[in-house]
Image: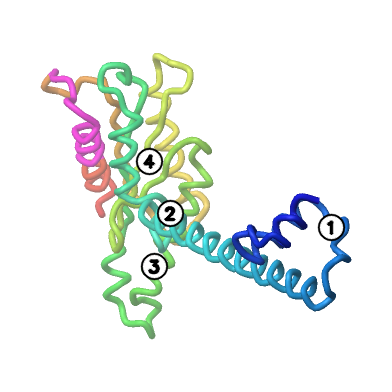
Amino acid sequence: MQMEKDKKDGTAASDLEFALRIRQEGSQNIDSYSPEYVNGLFELLLEQDAEVSNLKGQLVNIKVELEKALENNFVDSLTGCFNMNFYEKIKKENFNPEKDQNKIAIVFIDANGLKTINDTPIELGGGHDAGDKMIKNIADYLRECFREDDVVIRPYAGGDEFIIICRNRNDNPDFSAKLNARVDSIRNSVKEKSLPFSFATGVAVYGNKPHNNRQDSDLNETRERAESRMYKCKREMKI
């Protein structure tokens, strides 16, 4: 075999290279070498396998950590909802001001009574843990009530607001009216089910001209209109 000649002639770069060639080309005529030398070759291969396996493990761990860091950058740690970074990503990559008129809406939701719960003594059932529990319950309820492809966002850690981005999937001309009715139903069902929380809501559709008859310049203005309507709802709820 050529590899035997290479080894005997001393032209192989190293024992490891020679061992790798044995693995690749086969082990015919390897019995022409001493058992000690052959065992040494296989030990080199085992060491290399261990090094490769260890390197693969390190790369997998790095990949997992990078994915986790990326996920954490877009996900609220308390609720598992997306955060403001993800909202900015959608606004930058998945929003077209010219084509998305009447195709995308913002639902602005504000939890009622979070500050009161946080300020209530623990022995009376309050405190920040109780407040966190309420926020998590609201997040779970919103994910349950809205469609799977609606994006539920808790924009700020420690806050009591949620933003839901809803798309007009079928270019329905009644998108705004139907979404408002659905959001009203979701809000009212909280009381009907005697759930331990409540929230105010506001809806705005990008492309629907507000009272001043001026088109929203971007999604942030749509969000601001939704927030304004949420405060109107809160006043009507006398919160």
Task: Find numbered disc 1 in the image and state the secondary structure of the residue it sits on.
Answer: loop
Q: Residue furthest front?
A: 9
Q: Disc 2 residue type? A: Glu
Query: Upstream in the sequence, badge 2 or badge 3?
Result: 2
* Residue 111 placement (x, y as % from top left): 33, 55
Task: Find numbered disc 3 in the image and state the secondary structure of the residue it sits on.
Answer: helix
Q: Residue furthest bottom?
A: 123
Determine crowd level at label 1: few under 14, some 14-19, many 20+ residues with C-alpha closer than 10 A.
Answer: few
Query: Upstream in the sequence, badge 1 or badge 2?
Result: 1
* Residue 21 placement (x, y as % from top left): 72, 55
In screen coordinates, is 167 left or right of 226?
A: right
Q: Disc 4 residue type? A: Ile
Q: CA distance from mark 2 to mark 3?
A: 21 Å
Determine crowd level at label 3: few under 14, some 14-19, many 20+ residues with C-alpha closer than 10 A.
Answer: some
In this rendering, is residue 42 above or below 59?
A: below
Determine the main secondary structure of the stretch shown in magenta: helix
Query: Upstream in the sequence, badge 4 or badge 3?
Result: 3
Q: CA distance from mark 1 to mark 3?
A: 65 Å
Query: Upstream in the sequence, badge 2 or badge 4?
Result: 2
Q: Which residue is mark 2?
A: 71
Q: Which residue is mark 4?
A: 164
> Given contact means CB atoms under 8 Å apart, are the residues at marks 2 and 3 in contact?
no
Query: Upstream in the sequence, badge 1 or badge 3?
Result: 1
Magenta-highlighted residues: 213-229
